[in-house]
Amino acid sequence: MGGPYLVFKVLESESPPTGAESDSIFASVYEQHFTFVWRCLRSLGVSPAVLDDAAQDVFLVVHRRLATFEGSSSFRTWLFGIVRHVAFNYRRTVQRKTGRAQQLGGNLPSSAPSPHDNAEANEVTAFIERFLASLDDKKREVFALAVLEELSIPEVAEALGIPLNTAYTRLRRAREDFRRAFSERRLAP
Amino acid sequence: MTRSEAEEAEAWLQQARRSLAPNLADRARVRVALGSALAAPLPSSAATRLGNVGRILARRLPALALVGVVAGGAGYWLGYHAASQTRPARVSEPQLQRAARTPAALVPPPAAQAQAPAAVGDRQEPRDSGARTGSGSMRRADPNAPPDPRSTLGEQLPEVQLDEELRTLRRAEHAQREGNPRLALVLLEELSQSTRGGKLLEEREAEAVVARCALEPEQATALRSAFERTHPASVYLERIKHSCGSGAE
C-alpha cells in the first residue's frame, strides 16, 4: 500500500499522474519512509540541530523527482541516493548555518536530547553515534543500510553503486569494528 | 565475542534503531515545516539552494495548498481537524465535565468509541440542540442558528498553538519512555482541557492510547481496536499494535 506501490501503479498507467494523484503519492511516501530518511540522516552524521532541515530538503527533492523514479531499482535505494547527497551537503556546509526550520517553524521544539531523555537510550545513542563517527564514510554507509536499516546486501550494493563483493567486504569490516567497539565499551570503567 | 556478548550487542543495535528513529514530535515538526515550504514561497536562500525545486513548487502552490501534501495524508488530518471543529462532543459542557473527571478523557473508553463512530457529531447534534432549546423545534430545524452559549464553553478556550502541541507531545513521549504513562496522559489531558482545536489531534490520540495501554493492559485490545476504527489509515497503527498488541491477548 502507498509509497512504491502507488508509484508503480502510476508508472504502469498510460496517462501521467494528475496533480492530486502525485500529491497523494508524495504524502504516502513521506509517511512510509520518514523514519528511514531520518535515521539514515542521523547515521550518516547529520547533526541533530539541523536534522529537521535536512529531512525537509530530502523530501523537497523527492517531491521534485518522484516522477523520475523508474522502478528499475528498489524505492529505498533510490531514496537513499537523495539522502546520501543531502547528508553530504549538510555535513560539508550547512551545519555552520542557522537552521531554516527556525525561519519556518519558529521556536518549535527540537529533537535534541533533553535531560529527561531515558538514560539507557542516551547511552546507546551516544555509543552508536560515536561508533558511526569513528567509521570512514564507506563503512558507515554500509553499516547504516545493512545493519541499522536491515537492507539486503544486494540492495546495499545497488544503493551505493558498488559491486556486491565490495559491499560484503565493507560490511564484514564494519561489523568487526562494531564488535571491537562494543567489547571496549564493556571493558571501560 | 561470546554468544551472550553477541546477544547483548544485538540488543543494543535494536535499541539504537529505536533511539535514532524519529518520534511523533519530530515527524509532526518536519511535516509542518515541509507543508510551509510547499505552501508558501521559499525563503530566498532556500530557493536559491534548491534551484528548480523551489520554482516548480512555487508553480504548484494552489494545488499543494489544497491537498496538504504531507502527513498520514495531510488532507486526512486537516479533514479530521476540520471535522473536530464541528463536533459538539469536543466542545460541549458534558464532555468537558467528563474530561475533568477522568485523566483518560482524551481517548474515549473503548465502549464509548464503539458506540461513537465518525458521525458522532451528526448523531448528537439534534439531541444537544433539543436539550438546550427546551421545546427546541426552531433551533433544530435551523442548521444556521447560532449555538447556545452553554454548549460553546470549548469555543471560549484559546486555540492551541502548534508549538504548544509539539512541546506537550514531546514531554508526553519522554514521560512514556521514562515509564510514566500516567504523567503522559495528564500532560495530554491538560492540553485538551485548556485549549481547543489542534493540528496534531491524531498524534495526541495515538500517544494517549499508548499510555492507556500501559496503564490498563486489560483494555489494550479494545483501545487498539477503537483507535483502528477511528483512524484506519493511521501511520501510528504499527506503534499502537506494538504497544497494545500483547497486553490483553
Image: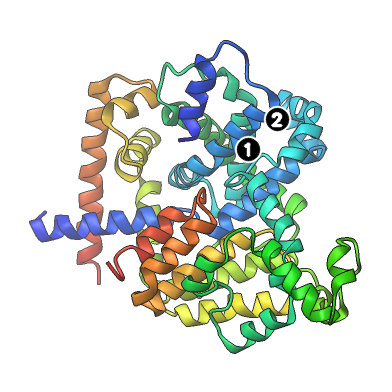
Q: Residue at x 22, y 59 (%)?
A: A184
Q: Is residue A137 left or right of residue B80?
A: left
Q: Residue at x 28, y 59 (%)?
A: B12
Contact (Cβ within 8 Å) of mark 2 with mark 1: yes
Q: How is the image coloured?
A: rainbow
Mark 1 — on which chain does it sit?
Answer: A
Q: Amino acid at mark 1?
A: Asp
Location of residue B236 with respect to B154 vertically, above or below: above
Q: Is residue A64 left or right of residue B248?
A: right
Residue A45 shows in this picture: yes
Percent x, y for residue A73? 41, 20
Q: Residues within 10 Å of mark 2 (few under 14, many from 20)?
A: some
Q: Secondary structure at mark 1?
A: helix
Q: Residue at x 22, y 22 (%)?
A: A165
Q: Residue at x 40, y 79 (%)?
A: B215
Percent x, y for residue A131? 34, 51
Q: Residues within 10 Å of mark 1 (few under 14, many from 20)?
A: many
Q: Are marks 2 and 1 on the same chain?
A: no
Real-space CA distance between mark 2 and mark 1, rounded to the nearest whole angstrom: 8 Å
Location of residue B200 with respect to B209 vertically, above or below: above
Q: Which residue is mark 1?
A: A57
Q: Which residue is mark 2?
A: B50
Percent x, y for residue B51? 73, 25
The single residue placed furthest to the bottom in the displayed view is B101
Percent x, y for residue A115? 51, 74
Q: Secondary structure at mark 2?
A: helix
Q: Amino acid at mark 2?
A: Leu
Q: How many marks?
A: 2
Mark 2 — on which chain does it sit?
Answer: B
Quadrant that contains the C terminus of chain B: bottom left
Q: Is residue A33 left or right of residue A177?
A: right
